[in-house]
Image (tube, rainbow, N blue to C red):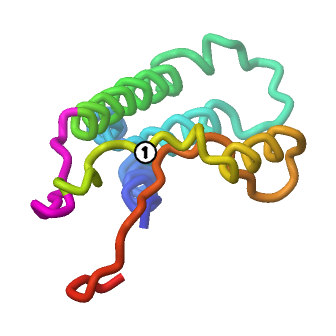
Amino acid sequence: GVSLPYTAWSMLVQFFPQERELLDILSDIFCIVPPFAFQRGFGGLLEVSAEFNDNSIGWNDVWGFRSRVWYTILLMFAIGSLEWFYLYRLTSTRPAKTKLSKEETAEGYSQPVDASRDVDISAERERSLENDEGINARELVKVFHVKASDNKKL
């Protein structure tokens, strides 16, 4: 499914070689979608020469605008940075969704538990730092102590 737009574009280039300039402009616009940009850049590399050891190829052929390699790399970096910034802002400014009942708030469940004084957790952390085998607990963030009651399902 990800390769269908690039496949369609490359087929149009083969069927309508006289419209190559228009199709290149359309592919430049579609390069805002990172998978298409990657395929377009890789295809541009393959399009430079069909031969493996072509002595007439230079760096200008690879990095020139016709192959669009630098353009696709630039767009993938720009769009990826924008997506990362959007997700960072979305996750860092989102309010907490946990709503505790009044009795849970009164019992102190909303306060973080200091696990550094827990002997078992400290011992597991020390064991995990000794070797790198298996699943090891290194830095536990939270420990939830919940009292079982009749009206709650655990």
- Residue 19 in view (yes/no): no
- Within the image, what quadrant is residue 152 found in? bottom left
Q: Nearer the viewer, residue 141 or 26?
A: 141
Local packing at callout 1 (Cα closer than 10 Å; few below 14, some 14-19, many 20+) is some
Q: Nearer the viewer, residue 139 or 33?
A: 139
Kind of residue at badge 1: Val
Q: Residue at x 43, y 26 (%)?
A: 77
Residue 8 image offset from top left, x and y in percent: 38, 59
Part of the protein shown in magenta: 93-104
Q: Residue at x 36, y 24 (%)?
A: 78
Q: Is residue 38 left or right of residue 88?
A: right
Q: Is residue 70 above or below residue 143?
A: above
Q: Is residue 95 magenta?
A: yes
Q: Main secondary structure of the magenta part?
A: loop
Residue 90 image offset from top left, x and y in percent: 22, 38
Q: Is residue 131 left or right of residue 109?
A: right
Question: Which residue is denoted by mark 1 in the rendering?
Answer: 113
Q: Secondary structure at mark 1?
A: loop
- Residue 64 in view (yes/no): yes
On-image quarter of the C terminus = bottom left
Residue 125 image offset from top left, x and y in percent: 73, 43
Q: Residue at x 79, y 45 (%)?
A: 128
On-image quarter of the N terminus = bottom left
Count of numbered circles in the view: 1
